[in-house]
Image: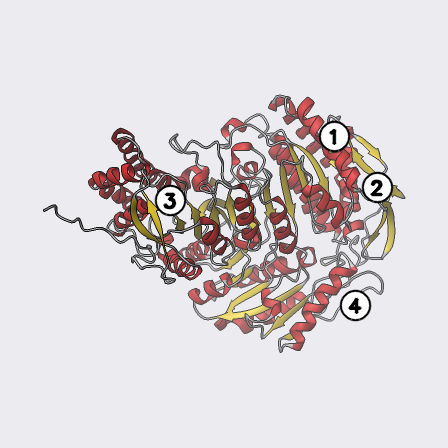
Amino acid sequence: MGTFDYAPAPESTAIVDVKSTYSLFINGEFVDGTGTSFKTINPATEEILAEVAEASEADVDRAVAAARRAYHKVWGPMPGKERAKYLFRLARIISERSRELAVLETLNNGKPIRESRDIDIPVAAAHFFYYAGWADKLEFSGYGDKPLGVAAQVIPWNFPFLMLAWKIAPALACGNTVVLKPAETTPLTALLFAEICQQADLPPGVVNIVTGAGETGRALVAHPDVDKVAFTGSTSVGKQIAKVVAGTRKSVTLELGGKAANIVFDDAPIDQAIEGIVDGIFFNQGHVCCAGSRLLVQESVADDVLERLKRRMGTLRVGDPLDKNTDVGAINSAEQLAKITELADDGDATGAQRWSPACDLPGTGFWFAPTIFTGVTQAHRLAREEVFGPVLSVLTFRTPKEAVEKANNTPFGLSSGIWSDKGSRTLWMASQLRAGVVWSNTFNRFDPASPFGGYKESGHGREGGRHGLAGYLAKGGN
Amino acid sequence: MARADVRKTYKLYINGQFPRSESGRTFEVLDAKGGFLANASHASRKDARDAVSAARSAFPSWSARTAYNRGQIIYRVAEVLEGRRAQFEAEIIAAEGVTAAKARQYVDAAIDRLVWYAGWADKIAQVTGGANDVAGPFFNHSTPEPSGVIAVMAPQGPLFGLVSVLAPVITTGNTCVVVASEAYPLTSITLAEVLATSDVPAGVVNILTGPQAEIGPWLASHLDVHGLDLTGVTDPDLARTLEEGAADSLKRVRRPDPTEDLLATPALDRMTAFLEIKTVWHPMGI
């Protein structure tokens, strides 16, 4: 079955005013950086969107000092019910400017507008709304109501604005001030958020945004006047951060990589499972730490599942992220594309079988067709390393115990999926999987009320829900 | 003629047994007045690895027991300790040189602390987990689960200090390797005798004696260890080194807190430091 022909349905970019240059946001004002500015592009076209300031160590120091002042003078002493109102304002303005944010996110990240419009931005607004409500109820949290101080937050490029919300909303609700560094390749929605902070009359210094790459992040995390480090990103950088904060007073939460097993039993609702497998690995081009990147399918239904999966993959629309019909957008960067290509090539070289549906990829920009590998064993790099791209490894199993063993056979432990219509088996499986989030008969669901975070080398601490407060309160432990 | 007493050989406690250090090493332990008490086993890297291996093997069945059952076992430890309190009081007086009243207070506190934690086993999930009201037709529920194998650097207090760090770790279903108080190691091995006769399965608690600075790094960097409790580390440089060692495998680390009053009612974080929150989603529909 081929793809239906759809007329192009591009979302207009007129709603967003992309400036030619962007500066840092420190103490409530946009200020020049003293580092070497860098260009940020649209990964779907490789067009340069803007020139962005790089925060040097001195700039980071200014931002931390601004956050410290705001913490002592304004935000720390402010009653929770007043802080709450600022957070509610932020939530509302995000909703009001949601289309603008969604378009800018898609331009800078390459993700389909359908996802930035329906998931990233609304869930981010919901996150601020959720934590706004906690600000004056912290004494019921179980972690006390005393904040930590200044939070250094470093976020990745896969969900730039949503990760900003996951970091900033709980930090501010608890009375901390923040210095946030967005990812080098996706700084623009964070800088738009800075404008939103101004519109909300958020007191200067409560939120500071410093842009830059690894050096800026290192300076921020290592800054001696930071009380809290929150990082989402790769496990290797997470380990470096754990080392940097060792022996300090800094509290740390880390949300790192994953290699989730998505486990399909023979009694699964197969059509739903196919949708869940596709959503699990091709959502956001597979740039998802909790992506269901290892499909474990029970041997007796493996052929059927694979056939249906291939048929479904044949209908995925890959291309212009701004087109409202697009399912799979652009890979975020040339660097990431090279990494995905390398791991896929390793799969070829080590005897796994690659399959992709026929699809025309655009000539410019960074693209990788939705891909599955069969004949994958647990020894393959494809099954062990995080690809962070639209590449699914398929393995089979015979018994539930074997599924558990294979699923847990990884240093990661972020998420997992179970597809079965037998309740007792699902709950047993859920109890056996060493992962922080288990989706059964669904996948890749996110909600501000639902704690998210990993076991083992997928990091520690939780984001979302009451548990998400722990990392920002003095009695939260850790 | 006076009867010569039969003295105890203090060995390690690994996998429910009492082996000597495979290294053949011992170190001299003196009493409060500087007199000879015993030669304690000086645990080696190999002993530490054997202990981790035992703890890892014990984890699946210990963590899978019902919380009620774990609670009963921790309570049983308290019962057996109560019955042997005279021995512990005598050992504490000999080792630390404290008064009889003080020794009694420590033993009381240790027993009471065990009873306190025994009652937590089947309540911690209710207090730290719960239902999450997500915006959609989903059942969404969070529960705590034990992190795995925890390496515990025990504080100085030979009995109460050890119980204070040990009980919260195992109550929730973790297994552990403890490096006992360096200054007063002997009582920890006597406590191991209590554990061994209280239905605590072999391997759930393993106790090593010897220098923290020597044994600690092997445990901090061991890939089968999931958490590190540094409560008993008083040297900040050693604490940093151990935390750095733990970073490579992203262990959960509980840093030492010199202001902590162990005798006060503990906060939940002694347990939650080594618990993972698991959140399960399932759609609702007809």
The answer to whether dots 1 and 2 both sit on one chain is yes
Q: Nearer the viewer, residue B182 or A231?
A: B182
**Residue at left offset 75%, top offset 65%:** A338
Mark 1 or 2, nearer chain start: 2
Answer yes or no: is residue A245 visible.
yes
- Name the side, left or right, on which A438 lies relative to A121: left
Q: Nearer the viewer, residue A105 or A432?
A: A432
Asked whether the viewer can see residue B146, the reply is: no
Image position of B153 with respect to B61: above or below: above
Residue, disc 3: B166
**Of the pair A182 and A275, the residue shown nearer to us:** A182
Q: Secondary structure at mark 3?
A: helix
Quote the CA–CA distance across marks 2 and 4: 29 Å
Q: Label 1 lies in what chain? A: A
Choose mark 3 or mark 1, whichever is in front. 3
* Residue highlighted by disc 1: A66
Q: Position of residue A364 (x, y in %)?
A: 85, 62
Disc 1 versus disc 4: nearer the observer = 1
Residue furthest right in the image? A20
State how far apart marks 1 and 4 are (Cα). Answer: 50 Å
Q: What number is the disc on residue A360?
A: 4
Amino acid carrying mark 4 in the image: Asp
| Disc 1 element | helix
Question: How many residues crowd around disc 4 within 10 Å: few (fewer than 14), some, or many (20 or more)?
Answer: few
Residue B113 in the image: state x and y as whole percent.
Answer: 33, 36
Apparent side of residue A266 relative to residue A278 in the rendered image (left or right) = left
Q: In the image, what residue occupies the spot 53% across and 49% down?
A: B242
Q: Are marks 2 and 4 on the same chain?
A: yes
